[in-house]
Amino acid sequence: MINEKNLQLGTARSAIRELFEYGKRQAALVGAENVFDFSLGNPSTPAPKEINDAVTEILSTCDPIAVHGYTSAQGSIETRTAIADSITRRFGTSADADDIYVTCGAAAALCCSFGALTKDNNTEFIAIAPYFPEYKVFVEGAGAKFLAVPAKTDDFQIDFTRLEATLNPNSAAVIINSPNNPSGVVYSADTIKKLSALLERKSEEFGHPIYIIADEPYRELVYDGIEVPFIPNYYRNTIVCYSYSKSLSLPGERIGYIYVPKFADNSRQVYAAAAGAGRAMGYVCAPSLLQQVITRCINATPDLTNYETNRKLLLENLTTYGYECAAPDGAFYLFIKAPDGDGNSFSEKAKEKNLLIVPGESFGCKEYVRISYCVDTDMIKRALPCFKELIEC
Ligand code: PLP
């Protein structure tokens, strides 16, 4: 007996992974230097030196059994305290260890949050398109329904008329990802204020809180001094899902957390239900070594030099060639409008030149393609003539 839905999920790769695997096969045929792979969001900047130093020090000085042992299901008290103190210090709120659940990256944090808020199979979660494609998989995996509301296409901020029309008594939460994958856009304080006012009003009308799930793996990856609003400071019913995958270049290490503020409605039940969802899915006791690393390196910051260079290089050249793109404030993606208005066919055309860019359809915007610029700068330089030819032909 096989679960058909999971069989299908496990057989068909995501569009991003499909392209990445294709790139590896092409590299073996035509040489890696002739394949321009902009598919995956795998950080191209090494983890900060203090991370590697901490790993070495922990392994050489700590109790060799405890270092790899289980921690509490929700994460060690030391790690949760370090994270809570850092949130308190940075955002002027008052987090403590009991508000934090340490997870295997943002993916597990999101799955636990969806699991916590899914009352029954009528429960709905709303994302703003463009959105990270795995949201749909995670929401449906929790037994709920996934809905997408298109953003305004001029600046990719939230379209409140459409969002209001979509909210209904089954709405459990709105998923906000800022800086956004794939558009790179940061939702402004004005957008977050309007969103808070709308959700307050609708929560009142429907007689239950509608939460914001703030998915924040790119929080620290921002350019030109832009500020990312800390959403719990604007809307109390916020659940933050954070990850060190992108900010500290640790995607394979699987470490992140959920923060459920004490001042959120039903805060302790939401926290307990997230922990319960974690238990049901086996997302307990996030990697112990990495918990210790994060405890020691809680103030580590990313080196943005490579991403800043790549962003400037691509943005300046692509807009000169005539591509349309909302200026990305953060993350490491450009979401450009396909010149022929069809992201799928444009991605296919690009593929013929071994230029791998992801069609926007899986992000909920089929007129666009995503370029992931966490890559080697020389590869961008080599790829630029291809981008130029593609818009000219
Ligand atoms: N959310 C967004 C917007 C992402 O882009 C990603 C990964 O690319 C994730 C969540 C998952 O992150 P993690 O690797 O921490 O599970």
Image: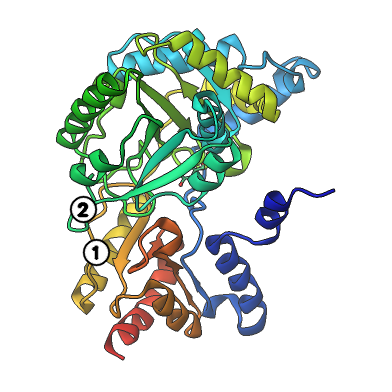
Q: Which residue is drawn at 54% across and 29% down?
A: 120
Q: How crowded is mark 1: few (under 14 residues within 10 Å), some or many (20 or more)?
A: some
The relative height of residue 211 versus residue 157 in the rendered view (above or below) is: above
Cβ of mark 1 under 8 A from ligand 1? no
User: What quarter of the picture does the C terminus occupy?
Assistant: bottom left
Tell me the kind of residue under disc 1: Cys
**376 or 358: nearer the eye?**
358
Q: Where is residue 142 in the image (x, y as percent from the top left)?
A: 58, 35
Q: Earlier in the sequence, mark 2 or mark 1?
A: 2
Tell me the kind of residue under disc 2: Lys
Q: In which quarter of the image is residue 372?
A: bottom left
- Evaluate whether residue 57 shows in this view: no
Number of numbered discs on residues: 2
Using residue 358 as the reference point, say whether residue 251 is left or right of it: right
Using residue 385 as the reference point, say whether residue 133 is left or right of it: right
Q: Position of residue 93 (x, y in %)?
A: 31, 12
Q: Residue furthest left?
A: 190
Q: Nearer the viewer, mark 2 or mark 1?
A: 2
**185 or 222: nearer the eye?**
185
Q: Any mark on residue 219, and which? A: none
Q: Residue at x 47, y 80 (%)?
A: 348
Q: Residues within 10 Å of mark 2 (few under 14, many from 20)?
A: some
Q: How far apart are marks 2 and 1 (CA)?
A: 13 Å
Q: Which residue lies furthest to the bottom in this view?
A: 393
Please tell me whether mark 2 sits on a helix, a strand or a loop: loop
Residue denoted by label 1: 325
Residue denoted by label 2: 152
Q: Residue at x 40, y 35 (%)?
A: 216
